[in-house]
Image (cartoon, coloured by chain):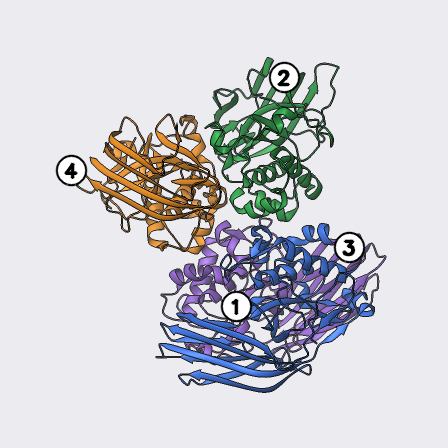
Chain colours: A purple, B orange, C green, D blue
Amino acid sequence: MKFNIFSELSYEIFSPTTFVFNIHAARSANQKIMEESLLITPALNFEEFTINNGEDRYIKLHTTNEKYFTIIYHAQVEVEYHIIDESFLLKSIPIMELDTEVLPYLFPSRHCEADKLRKLATKEFGPLVNDYIKVRAINDWIFSNIDYITGTTDSGTSAYGTLIQREGVCKDFAHLGIALCRAIDIPARYFTGYAYNLTPPDFHACFEAYLGGHWIIFDPTKLVPLNGLVKIANGKDATEAAVASFFGNTNCTYMNVQCGIAEQDFVPFITGKDTMEAISYH
Amino acid sequence: MKFNIFSELSYEIFSPTTFVFNIHAARSANQKIMEESLLITPALNFEEFTINNGEDRYIKLHTTNEKYFTIIYHAQVEVEYHIIDESFLLKSIPIMELDTEVLPYLFPSRHCEADKLRKLATKEFGPLVNDYIKVRAINDWIFSNIDYITGTTDSGTSAYGTLIQREGVCKDFAHLGIALCRAIDIPARYFTGYAYNLTPPDFHACFEAYLGGHWIIFDPTKLVPLNGLVKIANGKDATEAAVASFFGNTNCTYMNVQCGIAEQDFVPFITGKDTMEAISYH
Amino acid sequence: MKFNIFSELSYEIFSPTTFVFNIHAARSANQKIMEESLLITPALNFEEFTINNGEDRYIKLHTTNEKYFTIIYHAQVEVEYHIIDESFLLKSIPIMELDTEVLPYLFPSRHCEADKLRKLATKEFGPLVNDYIKVRAINDWIFSNIDYITGTTDSGTSAYGTLIQREGVCKDFAHLGIALCRAIDIPARYFTGYAYNLTPPDFHACFEAYLGGHWIIFDPTKLVPLNGLVKIANGKDATEAAVASFFGNTNCTYMNVQCGIAEQDFVPFITGKDTMEAISYH
Amino acid sequence: MKFNIFSELSYEIFSPTTFVFNIHAARSANQKIMEESLLITPALNFEEFTINNGEDRYIKLHTTNEKYFTIIYHAQVEVEYHIIDESFLLKSIPIMELDTEVLPYLFPSRHCEADKLRKLATKEFGPLVNDYIKVRAINDWIFSNIDYITGTTDSGTSAYGTLIQREGVCKDFAHLGIALCRAIDIPARYFTGYAYNLTPPDFHACFEAYLGGHWIIFDPTKLVPLNGLVKIANGKDATEAAVASFFGNTNCTYMNVQCGIAEQDFVPFITGKDTMEAISYH
């Protein structure tokens, strides 16, 4: 699938500030950047860097006397995803055989206190027949029990609180999904991206669980088709994959995010109750 | 029913300490003290006082040079309880018509953060048909989902934590029950007492919900028959009805609690799935 | 001193709602209501009740089909306060000799987790020479270290969080003061009232500590003269002395609070560094 | 310096369990393994892997029917450290110029909620003259205000709680140091190792702050000389550098850790009040 993605962010700046942006589409074998452009007004020097084996792309810039600035990014991206079927999904990989680079995603992180949810998660999801069914049950539980309401949480909110507060936005849904997976020893990580048909338009966050040797995508908000995502980055949680971080005194005054399809034959992939198929972007 | 109750507490004392004990059986129209004795060794002056309209009885004492002391209490108590049937249990009393003295039990307290559980409790228990069925569902949910394990919580633990940690002892079960009731606007309060047949022997804690004009007893541990309790005190939570509080540097070195029946015809009252009967001690 | 106090609250109502208001000036030997009036529009039946020995006055009302209502209260009140001097302030009253009704103010409450702050409070304030100096140090520490910023906290905020977040409003300042006092075994309680010269105008909250047999007033916001207060109520914390509580779906749309002096000779009382005088309203 | 290090860990195992151990001395240009041995009883296959550019060394093993096992490691290690003087320590490196691999250590992590401590840390340490003085003040503040007491915290404890609880062990001291540094935008990370002269003998944890282009070591416990450390690993916090992690039902029954000097000329390096010298192990 080809997507046209676009984002625009404006800031009011009250002191010299360093910004780190993570709004570029990730670049990988499965996600090709056909064309892209970045416009910063007023013009400012910036530095690019990548993490996760060069896939996830960041820029860093510093303002000195600027009072305002705007960053506009757009790109056309070709995204390939894989349908993972039952023969893989039901294959359990013992922790002993996990790749070293998957291991860190078993441990708790700032917004995903898996260590505190072990008993709860084991009671609720432990008895299910296999890891794929467990993660799907976690995903469905979050969708059914947490209300999607903007403005009820902030950047300090984490899975522990969301589990009781029962409301949040996409990042909170993702954090809770990740925490519950890790609490029953299933590796899980944060996924940010552009999402086709997301209403209201915004950056999106969901999560991936490592099942049968693949990172399988799950979106407990169920707001978008699972094959309508353009990946920006992965991380242990939002602290490692924030769209924008800053060091200084500043304020975001405007944000506009768009994700459209550059082709006509889009068939949304929705996880069905009866199918045993899932999607991996890797 | 007549009960013989007994408790013995020993302390090692490292600095002059003031103790407040709340181990006496409450005295009320429904609970008559047939005989009782209190032995403090070495002999120390103590002061008695009551709260809750003279029902709940406390003693206060101060140690100066003592290194150790032991307090032993026993009593024979006649307890009358009321079976409250459907005609009352299903009667809903609007908050507007609640007695002034019941109102405080609608608000959050130290260990019962009802304000933080409103959405969760409303989602889980709000749709049930009436207040009695809601409280019974809360009681059953706690019994089924929280593991009774000693040593996993301490005096700082509260309902919010127990809901996630999924383990605790009788006070934690009671706090969670109270918090969930208040979170859906049902008055609830803490109840401490001696309990017949409790294993291992200890002071017991459970809770009362205000339904149809009566304080109805619930015990989410389901460890004892509901008609086997001798009330010590009520309070908003354990901060208001602690068996022992102290101001100073001391350590409890021994505790023994007993509750036996002084008659032969005890028939345990257990809330059935099919019955609509409950017990009130007031 | 004579004060003219006034408050007006308007609500939009989305479902039948029961309101409990605590906006009347308290009535006591030291605080006489010279005249007062209450206007509810549209006219609604309401019920009055009192707590704390008849001093603190509440009203309760229920809306059924009303979509809006407004409550307006004003009163002229004569307030007498006592200057408590060194001879009392420095007198330490052992816990053993405290009145029974003062004892509850030694224990933690919903917003004042004194039990969790014991070590911190003991380290910071324990070594000071006497209880009055300790409370004054607590009051000054809060004033110096917590920023008064509206909108940074909500009704779920408590002392534990404020101690780290380092910002809040008058209720948060009061809760922290109370928690720190109780953490070093000094009884303390919440005080709400009307405050002369408070900017911006609002209801005010501060705290009282029990010193030398008197409830001494402290205001860690230092926003108003200590002798410019008209008491509404005391409580363990804001859960027991909220200006307005409601059970239902409603929203406060307007609030106006005023407190003026009905005489000309007001001399503000400010705690000095050198004086050993304090104020009690009891 | 040459050190002889030794560790022995025994486990009782109740279900098939995967263990990840991080007890090997790190291997780097500054830390050479002269000789080492690893003994696992009963013999079990294990897999070695490294992270952080091959420096930090882990082993992974899985038990199936074993009821007990013991792992014994010892090594002779030559450690070189660098004295970093004033000319570097006082050089401030803007965030914009930080290496990409240092950036992650500016963000909050599971046990170091720097985001929640920003105001507190800015008020307490922000006004100091330079970053080195700030970190030293943080280190001294922790040493002076937190009591080193074993058994008061557990693996779920984090900086936020330690700041109020005011007690903990080396990992808690380190987490608080890291959180406070990051809260004022100074990169900081966790450091585990063997420590010469640590009493009682145990693995040790402290932290490094990135100052003037170097990772400078700080130990807020002040229990060991700063030049007496043999590094095991770095991480964002203890979740990334735990000595032992396990997936299964097991229990550590014995632990013995030793760290001795293989030479005679050890001169302990202690940060003085007057000197501007510090130590880096990198």
Q: Are marks 3 and 2 on the same chain?
A: no
The residue indicated by pointer 3 is: D128
Q: Position of residue D56 (x, y in %)?
A: 60, 78
Q: Badge 4: few (under 14), some or many (20 or more) residues near its Cα, within 10 Å? A: few
Which amino acid type is shown beneath numbered disc 1?
Phe
From mark 3 to mark 1, how far is it between C-alphas?
36 Å
From mark 3 to mark 4, how far is it between C-alphas?
75 Å
Q: In the rendered view, does A271 fall on the left or right side of C150?
A: left
Q: Is the residue under label 2 in contact with that under label 1 (CB below 8 Å)? A: no
Q: Are marks 4 and 1 on the same chain?
A: no
Q: Position of residue A61 (x, y in %)?
A: 78, 65
From mark 2 to mark 4, how far is it between C-alphas?
60 Å
Q: Is the residue under label 1 in contact with that under label 4 (CB below 8 Å)? A: no
Q: Are marks 3 and 1 on the same chain?
A: no
Q: In the rendered view, does D66 fall on the left or right side of D79?
A: left
Image position of C80 with respect to C255: above or below = above
Q: Badge 1: few (under 14), some or many (20 or more) residues near its Cα, within 10 Å? A: many
Q: Name the disc covering residue C80, or none.
A: 2
Residue at the right extreme of this rendering? A65
From mark 4 to mark 1, how far is it between C-alphas?
57 Å
Q: Position of residue B226 (x, y in %)?
A: 26, 41
Q: Is the residue under label 4 in contact with that under label 3 (CB below 8 Å)? A: no
Q: Badge 3: few (under 14), some or many (20 or more) residues near its Cα, within 10 Å? A: some
The residue indicated by pointer 4 is: B263
The residue indicated by pointer 1 is: A107
Q: Chain of mark 2?
A: C
Q: Are marks 2 and 4 on the same chain?
A: no
Residue A129 found in image quarter? bottom left
